[in-house]
Image (cartoon, grey):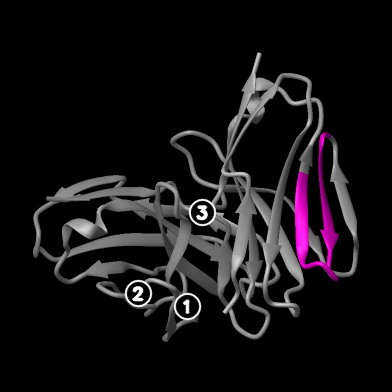
Amino acid sequence: EAQVTQNPRYLITVTGKKLTVTCSQNMNHEYMSWYRQDPGLGLRQIYYSMNVEVTDKGDVPEGYKVSRKEKRNFPLILESPSPNQTSLYFCASSWDRARNTEAFFGQGTRLTVV
Amino acid sequence: GENVEQHPSTLSVQEGDSAVIKCTYSDSASNYFPWYKQELGKRPQLIIDIRSNVGEKKDQRIAVTLNKTAKHFSLHITETQPEDSAVYFCAAPKAAGNKLTFGGGTRVLVKP
């Protein structure tokens, strides 16, 4: 089954404790991205990747890192989480550049930083 | 960069009535306009999209119209049903780059 898988689904952590949210897709998509969803603010792009070893900042990259060592995986790293990073996070992948094709979303990761 | 505005932020309709959501975008070179539906507690999923070489596209009870001159596109849902209750997002890509910008979302409530 074609899918985008994120882990964990829920995470509560403390300020400053490094964490990684994993994202994996099995559709051989080139384009992957991370979004955060906050009430009233919609979906805001954090980082995206056009292919292996190619990443770029989205609209709200501060406090986040990503890597794309393999085509299928695109982990999101919070080196020192802060309470303002409490949010619902979605990973998404697309066959080609985001401008022309459907984005498939993961199930979401609800992160709480206390 | 691309700026996408979506209105209204909430929409309450009676079952069987129509619902219309409108989005405006800023990048005149944008050429692909998807709409996503997000049910409560679930991930966004594509429901319909339109490319800039057509003005309207229809799929059963949903349709999207595009006005490139005015830089806006709209989602139309006819004969609404309770299962249409969800948050709907429009999106537009930055034509010269690879970022997809989403509108702020519209929470649609269909009252039985």
Spatial CA span between label 3 and label 2: 19 Å
The answer to which of marks 3 and 1 sits earlier in the sequence is: 1
The quadrant of the picture occupied by the N terminus of chain B is bottom right
The answer to which of marks 3 and 2 sits earlier in the sequence is: 2
Check disc 3 and report its element: helix, strand or loop. strand
Left or right of B63 in this view: B89? left
Total marks in image: 3
Which residue is tagged 1?
A: A49
Horizontal and vertical percent for residue A61? 35, 74
At 33% across and 49% down in the image, what residue appears? A109
Horizontal and vertical percent for residue A107? 43, 46
Which chain hosts label 1? A
The amino acid marked with disc number 1 is Ser
Whether the residues at callouts 2 and 1 have beta carbons within 8 Å, the answer is no
At 69% across and 56% down in the image, what residue appears? B23
**Is residue B80 or residue A9 the one in the foreground?**
B80
Which residue is tagged 2?
A: A61
Whether the residues at callouts 3 and 2 have beta carbons within 8 Å, the answer is no
Check disc 1 and report its element: helix, strand or loop. strand
Check disc 2 and report its element: helix, strand or loop. loop
Horizontal and vertical percent for residue B97? 60, 83
Left or right of A84 in this view: A105? right
Is A24 drawn above or below residue B20 in the view shown? below
At 87% across and 51% down in the image, what residue appears? B57
The amino acid marked with disc number 2 is Pro
Residue B27 seen in render: yes
Q: Which residues are magenta?
A: B61-75
